[in-house]
Image: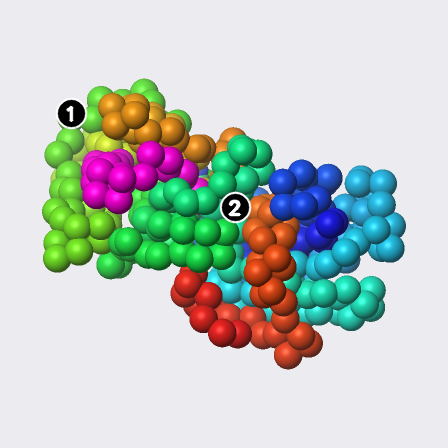
């Protein structure tokens, strides 16, 4: 089954064609990152307009690259939530029009389920159940993937997402948007012991997390240094910040593995590209004899292929939509009725 998959929830317009949920025939992306960089973050109105400009050409490009025609497409999938509402709407409207014009089923996909499904592309043998740490620009969660479309949220951030904090700290340090990748690189040259930053303690739900205290403490430290004219050791500050994020995430993943008994853990989302977090999870999981699934960097960030992968399983579960499908800025990954 060839699924044409559309993703436009943030600042990447993406169209991919994925066969049977596992084989990427083509994965086309038009990134707007350089455009938003000028403003230090995503400007929603600009994102929507650029999605409209890019999406038709990308769909044609996807067919051409895969050597397919519209007749070879069996269904159209789209991210319908969550994301910047104007941006998601562009993809949803395009997908509805394409599905209607081709007379093919329309499959709505939750963006975070898509991130998890990036693992099915990277690891053809991976099947649920498993645990997944989702760390993106907008979400930070530990999820029990009981089946392809059956999930349980073990824990979530109570305030900021990890990626949001990377981007905010990166911005204040003068790094180009989005700050995560630049901060990761700088951290590799630093010594985390040069700064002490707070790590959130487990609360009532030991899997929940908080990053706002860490973000505020880091920003205060930077502003204070600026006010008193003190030179910052930026690589070491980045290293201490990244270590604190990792020390928030990894022990919770370890606890989840221990308490659930799972021995498979996947990571997903843009922050899953972070070298320190990847290293720490691998090391911790190895001690427990657990296998870690980490998609390659290009599948960690937003892309259309991950939407096409999840869409296949949504289709098999009967989760298709009609022309009344709407876009949603927020929606639970648990997938209540549309
Ligand atoms: O999953 P994603 O592409 O978009 C959302 O769905 O949010 O994640 C984007 C986030 C941004 O916050 C970006 O700074 C972060 O992923 N990111 C990283 C790294 N690469 C991307 N954060 C830390 N280290 C990285 N190497
Ligand atoms: Zn994403």
Q: Secondary structure at mark 2?
A: helix
**Residue 267, x across and y down, in percent:** 40, 39
Give ligand 1's quarter of the image.
Answer: top left
**Residue 45, x across and y down, in percent:** 56, 66
Residue at image position (41%, 38%) is 266
* CA–CA distance in space, label 1 to label 2: 36 Å
Q: Main secondary structure of the magenta part?
A: helix
Residue at image position (38%, 54%) is 139
Question: Is residue 270 found left or right of 314 in the rendered image?
Answer: left
Q: Earlier in the sequence, mark 1 or mark 2?
A: 2
Observer-side mark, 1 or 2, equals 2
Q: Which residue is mark 1?
A: 193
Q: Which residue is mark 2?
A: 117
**Residue 62, x across and y down, in percent:** 77, 46
Q: Magenta stretch: residue 254 in it?
A: yes
Q: Secondary structure at mark 1?
A: helix
Q: Is residue 155 above or below residue 64?
A: below
Question: Is residue 233 found left or right of 78 in the rendered image?
Answer: left
Depth check: 19 or 241 in front? Answer: 19
The crowd level at tag 1 (other Cα within 10 Å; few <14, some 14-19, many 20+) is few
Q: Is residue 314 above or below residue 121?
A: below
Residue at image position (63%, 52%) is 312
Q: Is residue 46 above or below residue 250?
A: below
| Quarter of the rendering containing residue 240 | top left
For the image, the number of numbered tags is 2
Q: Magenta stretch: residue 103 in it?
A: no
Region rendered in magenta: 245-269
| Quarter of the rendering containing residue 120 | top right
């Amino acid at each position: 089954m060839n699924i044409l998959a559309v993703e436009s929830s943030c600042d990447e317009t993406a169209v991919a064609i994925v066969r049977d949920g596992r084989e990427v025939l083509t994965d086309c992306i038009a990134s707007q990152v350089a455009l938003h960089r000028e403003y230090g973050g995503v400007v929603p109105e600009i994102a929507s307009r650029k999605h409209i400009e890019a999406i038709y050409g990308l769909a044609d490009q996807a067919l051409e690259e895969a050597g397919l025609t519209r007749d070879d497409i069996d269904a159209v999938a789209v991210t319908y939530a969550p994301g910047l509402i104007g941006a998601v709407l562009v993809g949803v409207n395009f997908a509805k029009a394409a599905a209607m014009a081709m007379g093919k089923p329309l499959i709505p996909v939750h963006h975070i389920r898509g991130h998890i499904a990036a693992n099915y592309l990277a690891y053809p043998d991976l099947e649920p159940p498993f645990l997944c740490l989702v760390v993106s620009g907008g979400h930070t969660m530990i999820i029990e993937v009981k089946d392809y479309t059956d999930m349980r949220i073990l824990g979530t951030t109570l305030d900021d997402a990890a990626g949001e904090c990377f981007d905010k700290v990166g911005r204040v340090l003068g790094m180009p948007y989005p700050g995560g990748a630049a901060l990761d690189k700088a951290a590799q040259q630093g010594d985390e012991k040069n700064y002490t930053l707070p790590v959130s303690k487990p609360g009532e739900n030991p899997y929940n997390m908080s990053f706002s205290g860490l973000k505020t403490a880091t920003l205060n430290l930077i502003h204070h240094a600026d006010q008193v004219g003190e030179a910052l050791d930026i690589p070491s500050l980045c290293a201490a910040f990244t270590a604190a994020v990792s020390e928030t995430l990894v022990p919770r993943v370890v606890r989840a593995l221990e308490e659930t008994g799972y021995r498979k853990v996947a990571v997903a989302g843009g922050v899953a590209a972070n070298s320190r977090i990847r290293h720490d999870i691998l090391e911790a999981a190895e001690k427990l004899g657990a296998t870690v699934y980490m998609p390659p960097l290009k599948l960690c960030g937003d892309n259309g292929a991950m939407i096409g992968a999840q869409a296949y399983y949504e289709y098999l579960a009967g989760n298709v939509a009609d022309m009344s499908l709407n876009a949603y800025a927020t929606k639970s990954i648990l997938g209540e009725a549309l």
